[in-house]
Image: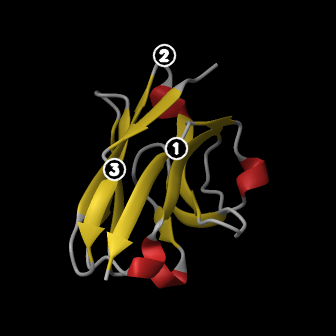
Amino acid sequence: QVQLVESGGGLAQAGGSLRLSCAANGRTFSAYQMGWFRQAPGKEREFVAAITRSSRTTYYADSMKGRFTISRDNAKNTVYLQMNSLKPEDTAVYYCAAVRSYSYHTTSSEYEYWGQGTQVTVSS
């Protein structure tokens, strides 16, 4: 079992940046493909980005391409989401998720483990 804990959320101004972190317990972090999702009030949870086990492949939702960067450090059991050029519509609770897989996944139902989420609020 994997436990995930997100951090780094907070308040940012439009055009600003935030870096989210997600720390995982256990010794098999490198066996998991990691993803970030977000959920705004009244909306469904949506895919943000994913990264494969060795960081060979990253994948982004279209609206995040060029602004967000997902990365991971397997030695630190941590996955990151660097968010630049933030917009008010990026306001949401951001979740990291893990699935034991060789490829990337973009659907929330494919993920096995979830963090508790961290709030990101972007003011205009």
Amino acid marked by disc 3: Leu
Point 46% across, 69% down: residue: 91
Amino acid marked by disc 1: Gly
| Residue 114 visible at all | yes
The local secondary structure at tag 2 comes to loop
Which label is found at residue 26? Answer: 2
Measured from the top left, where is residue 94 in percent x and y?
50, 54
Closer to the chain start, of discs 3 and 2, is 3
Q: Nearer the viewer, mark 1 or mark 2?
A: 1
Point 48% across, 43% down: residue: 53
Point 72% across, 66% down: residue: 44
Image quarter hosting the C terminus: bottom left
Image quarter hosting the N terminus: top right
Q: Which of 26 and 20 is in front in this view?
A: 20
Closer to the chain start, of discs 1 and 3, is 3
In this image, 118 relative to 21: left or right?
A: right
Q: What's the colour scheme?
A: secondary structure
C-alpha gap between disc 3 and disc 2: 20 Å
Write down the residue under mark 1: 117
* In the image, farthest residue toward the left: 16
Amino acid marked by disc 2: Gly
Write down the residue under mark 3: 20
Measured from the top left, where is residue 101 in percent x and y?
65, 42
C-alpha gap between disc 1 and disc 2: 19 Å
In this image, 95 relative to 67: left or right?
A: right
